[in-house]
Amino acid sequence: MLEIEYDGTDFNGWQIQPKGRTVEKEIMKAIKKIAKHEVKIFGAGRTDAKVHAKAQTANFKTESKIPIDRLPKAMNGLLPKDVSIVRAFEMPKNFNARYHAIGKTYSYHIYNSRIRSALLSRHSYYYPVTLDIELMRAATQFLIGGHDFKSFMSANSNIKNTVRIINSINICKRDKSIYLTFEGNGFLYNMVRIMVGTLLEVGRKKTTPEYMKYILESKNRVYAGCTAPPQGLFLEKVIYP
Amino acid sequence: MLEIEYDGTDFNGWQIQPKGRTVEKEIMKAIKKIAKHEVKIFGAGRTDAKVHAKAQTANFKTESKIPIDRLPKAMNGLLPKDVSIVRAFEMPKNFNARYHAIGKTYSYHIYNSRIRSALLSRHSYYYPVTLDIELMRAATQFLIGGHDFKSFMSANSNIKNTVRIINSINICKRDKSIYLTFEGNGFLYNMVRIMVGTLLEVGRKKTTPEYMKYILESKNRVYAGCTAPPQGLFLEKVIYP
């Protein structure tokens, strides 16, 4: 199992696609050079274009004899600067990074200033409207716990079981930056970004914290807020038993 | 006077050059569109390729009637994402951002980890060797005050007065990041990067803190350490009376 950090800005997301750079493809190429055979990679989460990861996980099988503690440095020597292997672990033979994950943590960085920041432009969402953090915190209370999050799923997705459990949502403000952290047993397609977009509408008083209840009950994407843009989103951690 | 933030990664430095993108050129183009006439720009410091700025300053003269408090947003609408105008001020007619500056603050970010970081690759120097921060702090004591910093100036520079005053050097460690902050009345060409490179040799015990004295006295570039790479350097602030 690899723990992978990447700057998503110049990637067309995690998953291999016919067009554009993808993180999975870069990793596959690096492993192939070291292991000297083709590998199939199983990533824990398929992040979208421009979404970042501090510790995405993925697994692959190999008979290669390279010591596991040498693997990160060996792979980093072959990988482009915007991907790095942070750690590597030997796992039981049947391990699957996706199916054995019991939870994930995502964070979202809002740059809440009247003027945009050049240095943070790749890693945050510039949002120049005044926000009431306390109202946003109040709204998160309605999202915590087990709920059918269908309203917070991209309309393009057609997954059937849309019930997920959110363990915690933290909002912290430091200077002009607001960091939202979501921990849950899993997230639907675009779920974090739609939650952020909806919490921003609460923060700017376009809607109330209590309205979250109504959005959840409606089970209809149109009642939630906009999908916040990808560059503010970080897959922080994949949780295993 | 403009206060300018930029991500230096994709720039060939501040100053207009025959080849490559430069920050000065981007700013000149944006002002021209707003003021409807050509302008000459005077920047406080000429940062090198890949060096960043949080608040570089520059001045220009115009008869344009655009309100000063609208200028940052108007310019940011025209500038690329990696440059932003943070603030703008009306100044006395004879003001010059470079000649009226009485000091500058630079910071340098070292990512001191065994494994490189993809997310920090544009904004830090990845340095995987163990460092003794206390030795580095001891070494800074010899650099503080007024000295002839000729040994800490790029050999390509032929400036005559190489005496500068350093008011403070702070070193702070947070997780795997080490931040060095230098405040002084002015800095010679590559001076901060050469001081960082030399302090790193102290930190890794290749040389001693006391050796700083000898380097200063030698007035010879060859005795100081390597020039640390540009991507870790940030022009933090230009100081005026």
Image: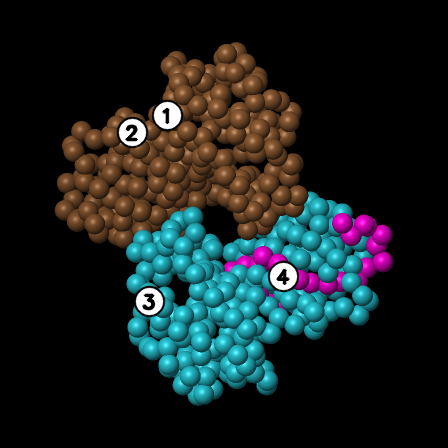
Chain colours: A brown, B cyan
In which quadrant of the rendered image does the C terminus of chain B lie? bottom right
Instruction: Identify the secondary structure beneath mark 4.
Output: strand
Determine if marks 3 and 2 fall on one subunit.
no
Q: Main secondary structure of the magenta part?
A: loop
Q: Which mark is residue A101?
A: 2
Choose mark 1 or mark 3, whichever is in front: 3
* Inter-mark Cα distance, 1 to 3: 42 Å
Residue A108 in sight: yes
* Inter-mark Cα distance, 4 to 2: 46 Å
Front-most of residues A82 and A78: A82
Badge 1: few (under 14), some or many (20 or more) residues near its Cα, within 10 Å? Answer: many
In which quadrant of the rendered image does the N terminus of chain B lie? bottom right
The answer to whether residue B231 is left or right of residue B133 is right
Determine if marks 1 and 2 fall on one subunit.
yes
Whether label 1 touches label 2, CB < 8 Å: yes
Stretch of the chain drawn in magenta: B45-69
Q: Position of residue A71 (x, y in %)?
A: 23, 49
* Inter-mark Cα distance, 3 to 2: 39 Å
Identify the residue under disc 3: B132
Q: Which mark is residue A186?
A: 1
Which chain is home to disc 2? A
User: Disc 2 residue type?
Assistant: Ala
